Each structure stands twice: as C-alpha cells, then as structure tokens.
Image (cartoon, coloured by chain):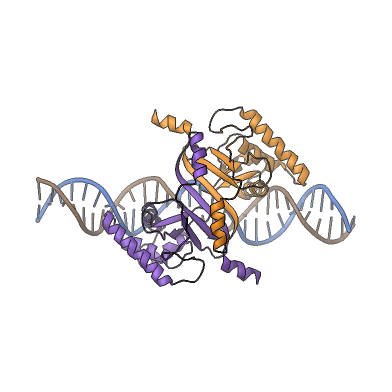
Chain colours: A purple, B orange, C brown, D blue
Amino acid sequence: MTFATAFGRDPFRPHDHRRCREAVRAAVEADCRERGLRLTPARACVLDALLESHRALTAYELLDRLRKAGLGQQPPAAYRALEFLVANGFAHRIERLGAYVACVHGGASHCAAFLVCRACRRVAEAALDEPEQALAAKAESVGFQVERVVVEAEGICETCGRAANG
Amino acid sequence: MTFATAFGRDPFRPHDHRRCREAVRAAVEADCRERGLRLTPARACVLDALLESHRALTAYELLDRLRKAGLGQQPPAAYRALEFLVANGFAHRIERLGAYVACVHGGASHCAAFLVCRACRRVAEAALDEPEQALAAKAESVGFQVERVVVEAEGICETCGRAANG
DNA sequence: TAGCAGGCGTTATATTGTAACAGATGACCT
DNA sequence: AGGTCATCTGTTACAATATAACGCCTGCTA
C-alpha cells in the first residue's frame, strides 16, 4: 500500500504538481482511447478542475467550473460528468465529505483508501491490494457479499497540523 | 474482530431481538448514569427507534418518531439527539447512507467497521481493535494525524442475496 | 436570588443529489 | 441519402440531508 501522487510522492507536501497533473491527464486520455470512452469537453473540464489540486471538490464547486467554461448550467451537468469519471475509475467520491477527487492511479478500477485532511480537504489515496482482508473474511462468515469498501481516515495533515500548533 | 448483536450473533439473521434491544438500552442507561450524561426523552426516543431493528435510519425518519411522540417538530430536534448519541458512542453515522444505527457495543468510544446491506439497509458492526493498522502506519509516515477512520463495506446480506437469486 | 450551562423550540436557509422529459449529435446500416 | 439508434446534453422541478442563529426555559449552584 503506497500513498502517492502520480510520481510517488506525498500529496500533502509540495511537489511538481504540473507534471503530476499532466501525467494523470495523459493517462486518462490514453485509457479512454483504449477503452472507447468519450472524454467530452464537460467531462474533461471536471477532470481538469479536480486535477488542479489534491483537494476534494463538491459537485457544486465543479458546476461553477462548468458554468465559467460555458459547458453546463445545472446540477445534472456536474453529476453526469462525475458519474462518468467515478464509474470509470478516474475519480473517487469521498463519502465523508460528499466531495470528489481525481484518481492518481490512472484508470483501472481498484479499491482505494484515503487520508482526508479536515482542514484543507486535501486527500491522499492509497491503493488497497486486498479489500480489507479481515473485513472480507468476516463478511464471508456471515454470508455477506461485499461489493465496495469505503476506507477513509479523517484527520489533520502535516502542513495543517504545523500551522495550528505554531 | 467480531460481528455481533448484543448477544454475539449475526444481526442479518433472526435472533432474539427483544433481548438484544433491551440489553443495549440498559447498558446505555447505566453508562449515562456513570458518566453523568442526560438521556432525555427525545434522546431516548431516537435511541429506541434505532434499537427497533439493525437497519440504518435517516435523521428525517427519526424526526418522524419524535413528532409522533410529541418530542420534537423540526430537524434540529433529530440532529441534536443524534449528535448526543454519536458523540457518546451510543450510535454511529453510516457515511455511505447518510443514516444512523445504534451501537451494539455499549457505550465506550471505539473504532468501528460496518457491513451495510444496500437492499435492506441492515448494518452489522465490528469493533476494530486497531484503527486499520496498515493505514495508521502509512498515515504516520506522511505526518498525517488520524482522528477518525470510516470503514464501510457495502453489499448484499445473505437474506437479501437469497431473495434475489431465488 | 443571580448567574450560568445545557437542552429545547422555531424560523429560515444551506448543501447535496435526482427524476423526468426533450433536444442534439454522431455512428452505423441499408 | 435517409433512417435508426445510442449517447450526451439542456432544462425544470424537486427531494433529501443538514446547519445557523436566536431566544426561552429549567435546574443547579455560588
């Protein structure tokens, strides 16, 4: 399990975010070509907004971007773009926040865990190799069929912790 | 890690729920006495509603109960009772659903994982001994201070699975 | 008995998300 | 070329979840 930007670094700390963002964007484009998915202007606009930072953005913040770009006016525009991005593994919904982040692991569907800073709303993502092994074992023992696992750790990132403690 | 009702059984399957419910209710009352907490009529009403089943209920479903009992009319009545119950470890919020369940582990604050059936909304709770050890280790390695961990497995319980598959 | 904290009532509003239907576009077939 | 189909988008209207802010009441206690 590793926490990473597109370049294997800690997203809570300064990094070459331009390269980080562009690498993910290129990977998504390539993946869409391969899988015959349409990265339409509205979808690309939402993805780009998410890629501007490692912060979780709400659907309405993303809708603002669509409005400014002239690519949509009403909530369904944002939710449709997000539905596409989440369904295809290009973004994740952070349940704890009702907000969304770009996926930094490039396309393939996977099970993810998140560190969510409640101060700056930045999110670090970890690929979980197994969907919480112990949990899966217990689920099986009661005949429960797991379809999706949400793992979100809420807290304070190093930067915000230092800012608060002086 | 064990999934349990108050009597160590699988909450997705039939059990002596009257005893299950009454034991939790008594434990909560005892805990409130010990800790000087006030289990007011409105709070008890919400707790009792949650204890009627192992299903997650929304704040507005709970507000209906308060209304019928003449113990509150507006949303804040429900949210205040829930705030008390959650803050003191007597209930949990299921982030995935925006809904609430009674805690079956009797009071002490703890870290929990949930199996959430998306068909019947019943919820099984597991006490996590350590707050996701691997996650905590990784958090520490990037200087992230974890305050709370959400672990929710969404899927289909045995009963609902059988109903669907014939 | 004055002050204080906690609990509650009420109004108003914020935030997040969906249903439903219609128009537009582009791919593909004949 | 024209027909047909699926997908994407526009729009209206609304549902569902949650909170801010203010003020009253009650019971404790200094």
Please name whichever residue, D19 or B67, is drawn nearer the observer in this view of the structure. Answer: D19
Residue B58 seen: no
**Res C5 quadrant in image:** bottom right
Q: Position of A9 compared to A164: left or right? A: left
Q: Position of A98 compared to D8: left or right? A: right
Q: Residue at 59% of width from left, 50% of height from top? A: B131
Q: Please identify the quadrant where the N terminus of chain B is shown.
A: top right
Q: Residue at 54% of width from left, 63% of height from top? A: B142
State the image coordinates of residue C12 (x, y, percent, origin top left): 58, 58
Q: Please identify the quadrant where the C terminus of chain B is shown.
A: top left
Q: Residue at 57% of width from left, 36% of height from top? A: B54
State the image coordinates of residue A23 (x, y, percent, origin top left): 36, 66
Q: Position of A52 compared to A119: left or right? A: left
Please name whichever residue, B146 or B83, is drawn nearer the observer in this view of the structure. Answer: B146
State the image coordinates of residue B47 (x, y, percent, origin top left): 65, 40
Q: Residue at 41% of width from left, 61% of height from top? A: A104
Residue B106 seen: yes
How many numbered markers are drawn? 0
**Res A164 quadrant in image:** bottom right
State the image coordinates of residue B53 (x, y, percent, origin top left): 58, 34
Please name whichever residue, B135 or B95, is drawn nearer the observer in this view of the structure. Answer: B135
